[in-house]
Image: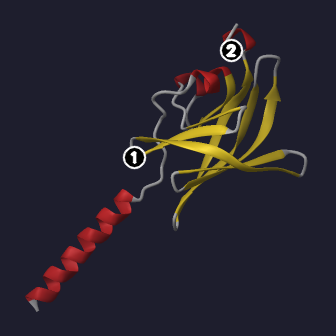
Amino acid sequence: MHHLIRLAIVLCILSVNARAQTNLKPDPIINIPAAMKNCGALYTYDSISLSRKKYILAVDMKNKGIISVGGKQIPLSLSATRLVNKIINVTTYKGNGYTVILSVKTDKQTTKYDTESGTAEIIKGKEKILIKIHGQSGCNESDQEGN
């Protein structure tokens, strides 16, 4: 009987540890490449002010992106893009076993950048997480390489 109780406790602990290790919640990206800052899109959780610059997803205009999960920065490459109802841009990025499906709409356009909102679905194996996001996209020509 004691063996069964010990086994149940060990299995419970292993189950909790396994869930903790597969957490897909993205961390703030520490080093965003200049190309993505200057000409791309930067997104954060919808509950975090953009002025805090705690970005969880960054993409450039050259089909590259990055996220950070578990303290590791994961490079991504664009694999698909489509427009839904002429409003929502859906882009799929893949890299290192991760798939990120970004669904955003433009909320406001200015001459400097667009403000966007939507969701990011992060998938790795059988694990999935859907996050509400918001961000900014555009190019700042004075900050681009060569200028």
The residue that label 1 is drawn on is: 70
Residue 37 in the image: x percent, y percent? 62, 23
Neighbours of disc 2 within 10 Å: few (<14), some (14-19), many (20+): some
Neighbours of disc 1 within 10 Å: few (<14), some (14-19), many (20+): few
The residue that label 2 is drawn on is: 144
Q: Element under label 1?
A: loop
Q: In this view, does 144 lie to the left or right of 25?
A: right
Viewer-side residue, 134 vs 72: 72
Which residue occupies 59% across, 44% down?
Answer: 76
- Is any part of residue 46 visible from this angle? no
Which of discs 1 and 2 lies nearer the camera? The answer is: 2
Residue 80 in the image: x percent, y percent? 75, 51
Quarter placement of the N terminus: bottom left
Quarter placement of the C terminus: top right
Colouring style: secondary structure
Q: Element under label 2?
A: loop
Res 39 quadrant in image: top right
Which residue occupies 74% across, 13% down?
Answer: 141
Decide: marks 1, 2 in contact (CB < 8 A)? Answer: no
Residue 33 vs 89, above or below: the answer is above
